[in-house]
Image (spheres, rainbow, N blue to C red):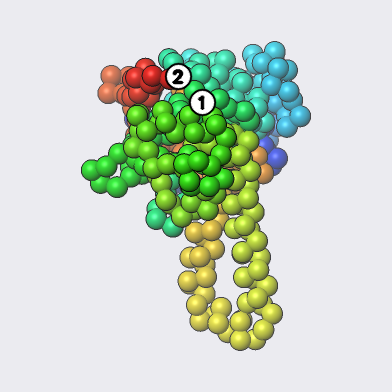
Amino acid sequence: MTTVIALDGMGGDGAPAIVLEGAERILSGKKDIHFLIFGDEKTLKSAVEPHPLLKKNAEICHAGQAVTNFTKPSVALRQAAASGMGLAIKSVADGRASAVVSAGNTGAYMALSKMFLKTIEGVHRPAIAKIMPTALGRSVVLDLGANAECDVTNLVQFGVMGSVLAEYSGIYKQNQSPLVGLLNIGSEASKGLIQLQQTAEILEKHVNFYGFVEGNDITKGTTDVVVTDGFSGNIALKAIEGTAHLIKLFLKESLSKYTSGKIGYMIARKSFKDLAARMDPRLYNGAILLGLRGIAVKSHGGTDAIGYAEAIKVAIELATEHKNPVDETATLSFNHTIEERIAKLSLL
Protein backbone atom coordinates (compact mmCIF):
# COMPACT_ATOMS: atom_id res chain seq x y z
CA MET A 1 0.00 0.00 0.00
CA THR A 2 1.25 3.49 -0.87
CA THR A 3 2.22 5.73 2.04
CA VAL A 4 1.43 9.42 1.56
CA ILE A 5 3.77 11.99 3.12
CA ALA A 6 3.00 15.73 3.20
CA LEU A 7 5.91 18.16 2.75
CA ASP A 8 6.16 21.85 3.59
CA GLY A 9 7.71 22.76 0.25
CA MET A 10 8.77 26.28 1.19
CA GLY A 11 10.06 25.58 4.71
CA GLY A 12 13.79 25.67 5.48
CA ASP A 13 16.84 27.72 4.51
CA GLY A 14 17.37 25.83 1.25
CA ALA A 15 13.74 25.33 0.25
CA PRO A 16 12.30 24.38 -2.12
CA ALA A 17 15.45 22.85 -3.67
CA ILE A 18 16.46 20.70 -0.68
CA VAL A 19 12.87 19.56 -0.12
CA LEU A 20 12.43 18.36 -3.70
CA GLU A 21 15.88 16.81 -4.01
CA GLY A 22 15.43 15.06 -0.67
CA ALA A 23 12.09 13.62 -1.80
CA GLU A 24 13.65 12.49 -5.07
CA ARG A 25 16.36 10.66 -3.11
CA ILE A 26 13.67 8.79 -1.20
CA LEU A 27 11.86 7.77 -4.36
CA SER A 28 15.05 6.38 -5.89
CA GLY A 29 14.97 3.65 -3.25
CA LYS A 30 11.25 3.35 -2.47
CA LYS A 31 8.44 2.92 -4.97
CA ASP A 32 5.46 2.90 -2.60
CA ILE A 33 5.68 6.55 -1.47
CA HIS A 34 3.57 9.45 -2.72
CA PHE A 35 4.16 13.08 -1.73
CA LEU A 36 1.83 16.02 -1.26
CA ILE A 37 4.03 19.12 -1.59
CA PHE A 38 2.56 22.39 -0.32
CA GLY A 39 3.72 25.84 -1.39
CA ASP A 40 3.68 28.32 -4.22
CA GLU A 41 2.46 26.30 -7.21
CA LYS A 42 4.41 28.20 -9.86
CA THR A 43 7.69 27.98 -7.95
CA LEU A 44 7.29 24.30 -7.09
CA LYS A 45 6.25 23.19 -10.57
CA SER A 46 9.31 24.87 -12.04
CA ALA A 47 11.64 23.47 -9.39
CA VAL A 48 10.31 19.90 -9.71
CA GLU A 49 11.19 19.65 -13.43
CA PRO A 50 14.71 18.19 -12.85
CA HIS A 51 13.25 15.42 -10.67
CA PRO A 52 11.51 12.82 -12.90
CA LEU A 53 10.57 10.41 -10.11
CA LEU A 54 9.02 13.17 -8.06
CA LYS A 55 7.00 14.44 -11.03
CA LYS A 56 5.37 11.00 -11.27
CA ASN A 57 4.87 10.47 -7.54
CA ALA A 58 3.92 13.86 -6.14
CA GLU A 59 1.03 16.30 -6.16
CA ILE A 60 1.76 20.02 -5.96
CA CYS A 61 -0.74 21.70 -3.64
CA HIS A 62 -0.87 25.48 -3.92
CA ALA A 63 -0.52 27.67 -0.85
CA GLY A 64 -0.60 31.43 -1.16
CA GLN A 65 1.54 32.13 1.90
CA ALA A 66 4.72 30.73 3.42
CA VAL A 67 5.80 30.60 7.05
CA THR A 68 9.28 32.14 7.25
CA ASN A 69 11.93 31.94 9.97
CA PHE A 70 10.72 35.33 11.21
CA THR A 71 7.01 34.50 11.35
CA LYS A 72 5.71 34.58 14.91
CA PRO A 73 3.64 31.54 15.98
CA SER A 74 0.64 33.81 16.60
CA VAL A 75 0.83 35.11 13.03
CA ALA A 76 1.29 31.58 11.66
CA LEU A 77 -1.90 30.52 13.45
CA ARG A 78 -3.85 33.36 11.83
CA GLN A 79 -2.50 32.36 8.41
CA ALA A 80 -2.99 28.62 8.98
CA ALA A 81 -5.56 28.12 6.24
CA ALA A 82 -3.37 29.79 3.60
CA SER A 83 0.22 28.77 4.43
CA GLY A 84 2.03 25.77 3.00
CA MET A 85 3.08 24.66 6.48
CA GLY A 86 -0.45 24.87 7.84
CA LEU A 87 -2.04 23.08 4.88
CA ALA A 88 0.59 20.32 4.99
CA ILE A 89 -0.19 19.64 8.64
CA LYS A 90 -3.93 19.84 8.00
CA SER A 91 -3.60 17.16 5.32
CA VAL A 92 -2.56 14.72 8.08
CA ALA A 93 -5.46 15.80 10.29
CA ASP A 94 -7.84 15.30 7.35
CA GLY A 95 -6.48 11.82 6.60
CA ARG A 96 -5.01 12.72 3.20
CA ALA A 97 -1.45 12.04 4.41
CA SER A 98 0.06 9.73 7.03
CA ALA A 99 2.75 12.14 8.19
CA VAL A 100 4.10 15.65 7.61
CA VAL A 101 7.69 16.93 7.38
CA SER A 102 8.87 20.53 7.61
CA ALA A 103 12.24 22.26 7.90
CA GLY A 104 10.56 25.57 8.66
CA ASN A 105 10.08 27.76 11.72
CA THR A 106 10.01 25.43 14.76
CA GLY A 107 7.75 27.60 16.93
CA ALA A 108 5.20 28.02 14.17
CA TYR A 109 5.38 24.34 13.27
CA MET A 110 4.67 23.29 16.83
CA ALA A 111 1.81 25.80 17.21
CA LEU A 112 0.15 24.72 13.96
CA SER A 113 0.64 21.02 14.73
CA LYS A 114 -1.04 21.42 18.10
CA MET A 115 -3.93 23.28 16.47
CA PHE A 116 -4.59 20.78 13.67
CA LEU A 117 -3.41 17.46 15.10
CA LYS A 118 -4.30 18.06 18.77
CA THR A 119 -2.45 16.54 21.70
CA ILE A 120 -2.92 13.01 22.99
CA GLU A 121 -5.40 12.87 25.88
CA GLY A 122 -3.70 13.94 29.10
CA VAL A 123 -0.54 15.34 27.48
CA HIS A 124 0.00 18.93 28.62
CA ARG A 125 2.72 19.83 26.11
CA PRO A 126 4.19 18.01 23.12
CA ALA A 127 7.99 17.68 23.04
CA ILE A 128 10.57 17.56 20.30
CA ALA A 129 12.22 14.14 20.54
CA LYS A 130 15.21 12.92 18.55
CA ILE A 131 16.82 9.51 18.23
CA MET A 132 20.55 10.14 18.50
CA PRO A 133 23.63 7.95 18.00
CA THR A 134 25.63 6.99 21.09
CA ALA A 135 28.69 4.92 21.93
CA LEU A 136 26.36 2.01 22.75
CA GLY A 137 23.82 2.39 19.95
CA ARG A 138 20.97 4.92 20.02
CA SER A 139 19.01 6.94 22.56
CA VAL A 140 15.93 9.17 22.65
CA VAL A 141 16.53 12.75 23.82
CA LEU A 142 13.70 15.18 24.60
CA ASP A 143 12.75 18.03 24.76
CA LEU A 144 15.00 19.67 22.16
CA GLY A 145 13.43 23.09 21.92
CA ALA A 146 9.64 23.06 22.00
CA ASN A 147 9.31 24.12 25.65
CA ALA A 148 11.95 26.47 27.04
CA GLU A 149 10.43 26.32 30.53
CA CYS A 150 9.07 23.09 31.97
CA ASP A 151 7.48 22.21 35.29
CA VAL A 152 7.52 18.84 37.05
CA THR A 153 4.42 17.61 35.22
CA ASN A 154 5.94 18.38 31.82
CA LEU A 155 9.22 16.63 32.59
CA VAL A 156 7.50 13.53 33.98
CA GLN A 157 5.30 13.29 30.91
CA PHE A 158 8.37 13.67 28.67
CA GLY A 159 9.94 10.74 30.51
CA VAL A 160 6.90 8.55 29.93
CA MET A 161 6.53 9.54 26.25
CA GLY A 162 10.25 9.09 25.61
CA SER A 163 10.13 5.63 27.18
CA VAL A 164 7.25 4.62 24.88
CA LEU A 165 9.10 5.93 21.81
CA ALA A 166 12.19 3.97 22.82
CA GLU A 167 10.09 0.82 23.20
CA TYR A 168 8.53 1.18 19.75
CA SER A 169 11.92 1.98 18.21
CA GLY A 170 13.64 -1.00 19.85
CA ILE A 171 16.04 1.19 21.84
CA TYR A 172 16.63 -0.91 24.95
CA LYS A 173 18.27 -4.09 26.08
CA GLN A 174 16.39 -7.32 25.49
CA ASN A 175 13.79 -8.22 28.15
CA GLN A 176 14.14 -4.83 29.81
CA SER A 177 12.15 -1.63 29.58
CA PRO A 178 13.97 1.51 28.38
CA LEU A 179 16.26 3.09 30.95
CA VAL A 180 15.36 6.76 31.55
CA GLY A 181 17.77 9.45 32.77
CA LEU A 182 17.06 13.04 33.84
CA LEU A 183 19.61 15.64 32.68
CA ASN A 184 21.20 17.54 35.55
CA ILE A 185 24.42 19.33 36.51
CA GLY A 186 25.57 16.26 38.42
CA SER A 187 24.61 12.64 38.95
CA GLU A 188 24.30 12.92 42.74
CA ALA A 189 20.76 12.85 44.12
CA SER A 190 21.27 16.15 45.95
CA LYS A 191 22.32 18.09 42.82
CA GLY A 192 20.19 20.46 40.76
CA LEU A 193 16.99 22.41 41.11
CA ILE A 194 14.26 21.28 43.47
CA GLN A 195 11.91 20.63 40.52
CA LEU A 196 14.40 18.13 39.10
CA GLN A 197 14.54 16.30 42.42
CA GLN A 198 10.73 16.23 42.54
CA THR A 199 10.61 14.96 38.95
CA ALA A 200 13.06 12.19 39.79
CA GLU A 201 10.91 11.02 42.71
CA ILE A 202 7.86 10.65 40.44
CA LEU A 203 9.71 9.09 37.49
CA GLU A 204 10.99 6.34 39.79
CA LYS A 205 7.39 5.16 40.18
CA HIS A 206 6.44 5.15 36.50
CA VAL A 207 9.46 4.27 34.35
CA ASN A 208 12.69 2.29 34.57
CA PHE A 209 14.49 5.26 36.09
CA TYR A 210 18.29 5.43 36.16
CA GLY A 211 18.63 8.73 37.99
CA PHE A 212 20.36 11.96 37.07
CA VAL A 213 22.70 12.06 34.08
CA GLU A 214 25.13 14.72 32.88
CA GLY A 215 25.71 16.17 29.43
CA ASN A 216 28.44 13.68 28.49
CA ASP A 217 26.09 10.78 29.30
CA ILE A 218 24.03 11.62 26.21
CA THR A 219 26.74 10.47 23.79
CA LYS A 220 27.97 7.74 26.14
CA GLY A 221 24.60 6.04 25.87
CA THR A 222 24.32 5.71 29.65
CA THR A 223 20.53 5.58 29.34
CA ASP A 224 18.07 4.80 26.54
CA VAL A 225 16.15 8.03 27.16
CA VAL A 226 17.40 11.43 28.31
CA VAL A 227 14.81 13.92 29.61
CA THR A 228 15.34 17.66 29.89
CA ASP A 229 13.62 20.99 29.27
CA GLY A 230 13.68 22.44 25.76
CA PHE A 231 16.12 25.23 26.63
CA SER A 232 18.82 22.89 27.94
CA GLY A 233 18.05 20.21 25.35
CA ASN A 234 18.45 22.53 22.40
CA ILE A 235 21.77 23.84 23.71
CA ALA A 236 22.99 20.28 24.29
CA LEU A 237 21.98 19.24 20.76
CA LYS A 238 23.69 22.21 19.10
CA ALA A 239 26.82 21.66 21.23
CA ILE A 240 27.00 17.99 20.16
CA GLU A 241 26.51 18.89 16.48
CA GLY A 242 29.10 21.65 16.74
CA THR A 243 31.62 19.31 18.37
CA ALA A 244 31.14 16.78 15.57
CA HIS A 245 31.84 19.47 12.96
CA LEU A 246 34.89 20.68 14.91
CA ILE A 247 36.40 17.18 15.15
CA LYS A 248 35.94 16.66 11.40
CA LEU A 249 37.61 20.03 10.73
CA PHE A 250 40.57 19.30 13.03
CA LEU A 251 40.99 15.83 11.55
CA LYS A 252 40.96 17.17 7.99
CA GLU A 253 43.50 19.88 8.85
CA SER A 254 45.81 17.42 10.60
CA LEU A 255 45.72 14.87 7.78
CA SER A 256 46.44 17.48 5.12
CA LYS A 257 49.20 19.27 7.06
CA TYR A 258 51.95 16.66 6.71
CA THR A 259 52.94 14.23 3.98
CA SER A 260 52.75 11.37 6.45
CA GLY A 261 49.17 12.37 7.23
CA LYS A 262 48.23 12.30 3.54
CA ILE A 263 49.83 8.88 3.14
CA GLY A 264 48.08 7.64 6.27
CA TYR A 265 44.75 8.88 4.91
CA MET A 266 45.28 7.00 1.63
CA ILE A 267 46.01 3.80 3.53
CA ALA A 268 43.03 4.14 5.89
CA ARG A 269 40.72 6.01 3.52
CA LYS A 270 37.85 3.55 3.93
CA SER A 271 38.00 3.81 7.71
CA PHE A 272 38.08 7.61 7.59
CA LYS A 273 35.05 7.68 5.31
CA ASP A 274 33.21 5.38 7.70
CA LEU A 275 34.12 7.70 10.60
CA ALA A 276 32.93 10.76 8.67
CA ALA A 277 29.61 9.09 7.92
CA ARG A 278 29.05 8.07 11.55
CA MET A 279 29.74 11.67 12.66
CA ASP A 280 27.60 13.31 9.98
CA PRO A 281 24.64 15.00 11.74
CA ARG A 282 22.67 15.02 8.49
CA LEU A 283 22.30 11.25 8.75
CA TYR A 284 20.48 11.65 12.07
CA ASN A 285 18.20 14.46 10.95
CA GLY A 286 14.49 14.36 11.75
CA ALA A 287 13.00 15.07 15.17
CA ILE A 288 9.53 13.91 16.22
CA LEU A 289 6.88 16.18 17.69
CA LEU A 290 5.95 13.70 20.38
CA GLY A 291 2.58 13.84 22.12
CA LEU A 292 0.44 14.71 19.10
CA ARG A 293 -2.35 12.59 17.62
CA GLY A 294 -0.64 12.62 14.22
CA ILE A 295 2.89 12.22 12.94
CA ALA A 296 4.83 15.46 12.51
CA VAL A 297 8.59 15.39 11.88
CA LYS A 298 10.86 18.43 12.13
CA SER A 299 13.90 18.70 9.91
CA HIS A 300 16.83 20.95 10.77
CA GLY A 301 16.25 24.27 9.03
CA GLY A 302 19.79 24.50 7.70
CA THR A 303 20.12 20.96 6.37
CA ASP A 304 20.72 19.93 2.77
CA ALA A 305 18.92 17.38 0.59
CA ILE A 306 20.70 14.46 2.25
CA GLY A 307 19.56 15.56 5.68
CA TYR A 308 16.04 16.31 4.49
CA ALA A 309 15.78 12.82 3.01
CA GLU A 310 16.70 11.40 6.41
CA ALA A 311 13.87 13.39 8.02
CA ILE A 312 11.46 11.96 5.45
CA LYS A 313 12.72 8.47 6.33
CA VAL A 314 11.82 9.08 9.99
CA ALA A 315 8.29 10.06 8.96
CA ILE A 316 7.94 6.99 6.73
CA GLU A 317 9.17 4.65 9.46
CA LEU A 318 6.72 6.09 11.98
CA ALA A 319 3.86 5.97 9.48
CA THR A 320 4.50 2.38 8.43
CA GLU A 321 5.76 0.71 11.64
CA HIS A 322 3.06 2.01 13.98
CA LYS A 323 -0.02 1.51 11.83
CA ASN A 324 -3.23 0.41 13.43
CA PRO A 325 -4.45 -2.86 11.83
CA VAL A 326 -7.96 -1.43 11.32
CA ASP A 327 -7.03 2.06 10.08
CA GLU A 328 -3.66 2.04 8.34
CA THR A 329 -3.45 5.84 8.27
CA ALA A 330 -3.52 6.01 12.07
CA THR A 331 -0.95 5.48 14.78
CA LEU A 332 -3.46 4.55 17.43
CA SER A 333 -1.47 1.72 19.00
CA PHE A 334 1.53 3.98 19.61
CA ASN A 335 -0.55 6.91 20.81
CA HIS A 336 -2.84 4.68 22.84
CA THR A 337 0.15 3.36 24.78
CA ILE A 338 1.23 6.93 25.58
CA GLU A 339 -2.32 7.82 26.60
CA GLU A 340 -2.56 4.82 28.94
CA ARG A 341 0.80 5.57 30.57
CA ILE A 342 -0.03 9.26 31.02
CA ALA A 343 -3.37 8.35 32.64
CA LYS A 344 -1.53 6.27 35.26
CA LEU A 345 0.62 9.15 36.41
CA SER A 346 -0.05 10.30 39.98
CA LEU A 347 1.52 13.73 39.74
CA LEU A 348 2.00 15.72 42.87
Viewer-nearest residue: 196 or 134: 196
Image spot of residue 332 (x, y percent): 35, 21
Q: Residue at x 63, y 30 (%)?
A: 148
Residue 209 horizontal side relative to residue 246, left or right:
left
Q: Amino acid at mark 1?
A: Val
Image spot of residue 158 (x, y percent): 47, 30
Q: Which mark is residue 348?
A: 2
Which residue lies most toward the bottom here? 260
- Can residue 275 be seen by looking at this rendering? yes
Residue behind mark 1: 152
Secondary element type, mark 1? helix
Where is the N terminus found, in terms of image quarters?
top left
Q: Residue at x 51, y 18 (%)?
A: 124
Q: Which mark is residue 37?
A: none
Residue 237 horizontal side relative to residue 292, left or right:
right
How many labels sit on residues? 2
Q: Is there a contact, CB below 8 Å, between mark 2 and mark 1?
A: yes
Q: Tell me if mark 2 has few (under 14), some (14-19) or many (20+) residues whose alpha carbon lies within 10 angstroms of its own.
A: few
Q: Is residue 108 above or below residue 184?
A: above
